[in-house]
Image (cartoon, rainbow, N blue to C red):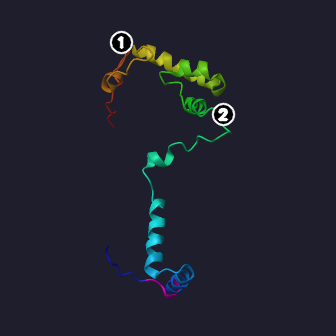
């Protein structure tokens, strides 16, 4: 066992001495017990700390279904799984979402991309489409 030297305020020393007398222990024994009691309160591994935290929740129903619904709520019209999520949770989406989805799918078709495919190289995507003229970046002379 290692011996330490610690500075404590006088009022804490008086409290420790009184507690030691009441419990019939030494001041050092009280301090050792206090440190031992404090150790389990230090932060645990974050996974262990959160594991099972919601297991006794009754206000959300089935926790897995609740979580799926929460995740579905963050689905956007340009996400590849929008149609499937929209079909499963229709109350989470409105006409505006459907309009944005149509705009997005039209844009994909213009780019020659099928829904669910990866996007082309950004430099290639910025090139003009066939049949259009590139805009001139020349400045007008003064």
The mark that comes first in sequence, 2 or 1, is: 2
The picture places residue 133, in percent across and down from the top left corner, at 36, 17
Residue, disc 1: 130
**Nearer to the camera, 38 or 65:** 38
**Nearer to the camera, 61 or 129:** 61
What residue is at 57 percent from the left and 31 percent from the top?
64
Residue, disc 2: 61
Label 2–label 1 contact, CB within 8 A: no
- Residue 96 numbered mark, or none: none
Question: Is 48 displayed left or right of 65 in the figure?
Answer: left
Task: Give the magenta part as a residue range.
Answer: 8-12
The picture places residue 43, in percent across and down from the top left corner, at 45, 56
What residue is at 44 percent from the left and 49 percent from the top?
46
User: Dot 2, crowdedness within 10 Å: few (<14), some or many (≥20)?
Assistant: few
**Nearer to the camera, 18 or 136:** 18
What residue is at 54 percent from the left and 42 percent from the top?
52
Question: With respect to residue 71, does 121 lie above or below?
Answer: above
Which SS class for mark 1?
loop
Q: Residue furthest right?
A: 59
**Nearer to the camera, 117 or 17:** 17
Magenta-span inclusion, residue 126: no
Q: Quadrant of the N terminus?
A: bottom left
Q: Residue furthest top?
A: 131
User: In which quarter of the view is residue 5 placed?
Assistant: bottom left
């Amino acid at each position: 066992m290692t011996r330490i030297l610690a500075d404590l305020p006088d009022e804490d020393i008086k409290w420790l001495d009184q507690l030691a007398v009441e419990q019939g222990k030494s001041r050092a024994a009280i301090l050792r017990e206090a440190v031992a009691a404090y150790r389990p309160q230090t932060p645990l591994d974050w996974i262990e700390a959160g594991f099972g935290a919601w297991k006794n929740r009754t206000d959300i129903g089935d926790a897995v279904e609740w979580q799926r619904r929460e995740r579905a709520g963050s689905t956007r019209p340009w996400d590849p799984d929008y149609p499937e999520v929209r079909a499963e949770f229709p109350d989470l989406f409105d006409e505006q979402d459907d309009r944005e989805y149509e705009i997005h799918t039209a844009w994909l078709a213009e780019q020659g991309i099928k829904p669910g495919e990866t996007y082309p190289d950004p430099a290639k995507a910025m090139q003009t489409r066939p049949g259009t003229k590139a805009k001139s970046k020349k400045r007008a002379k003064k």
